[in-house]
Image (cartoon, grey):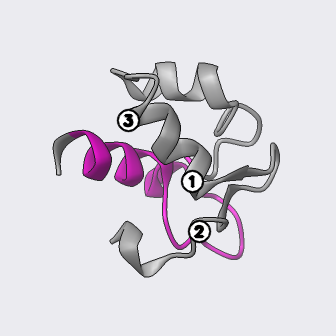
Amino acid sequence: MIENFEKDYEVCNCHKVKLNEIIDAISIKKIETLRELQEVTGAGTHCRHCVFEEADLGKVKKKIYCKDIFNEVKYG
């Protein structure tokens, strides 16, 4: 799924966190949990709409979520 997005795609609009920053945090910094990913990148720590689909209460839904990125990078 993440291959369908540009690396500079902004996953978290509140903190301006891009897809490549999330991927790097997971793979290079060896992030082990979604909570740790949020702490390191700041993604999903304000409105939380970008964490996972069930938390996305915005009128315009996100196209990809931190949880999906985490699972894909971490577990393939």
Please tell me how crowded label 1 is: few (under 14), some (14-19), or many (20+) other residues with Cα within 10 Å.
some
Residue name at image x 66 percent, y 38 percent: 43
What residue is shown with label 1? 20
What residue is shown with label 2? 62
Q: Quadrant of the N terminus?
A: bottom left
Q: CA distance from mark 3 to mark 2?
A: 23 Å
Residue name at image x 40 percent, y 52 percent: 69
Q: CA distance from mark 2 to mark 1?
A: 16 Å
The amino acid pointed to by label 2 is: Lys
Where residue 37 appears, as percent x and y from the top left, is 51, 28
Identify whether 42 is placed above or below 66: above
Instruction: Specify whether residue 66 is painted magenta.
Output: yes
Question: Residue at the bottom extreme?
Answer: 4
What residue is shown with label 3? 27
First to last magenta residue range: 51-74
Identify whether 33 is placed above or below 76: above
Q: Are marks 3 and 1 in contact (CB under 8 Å)?
A: no
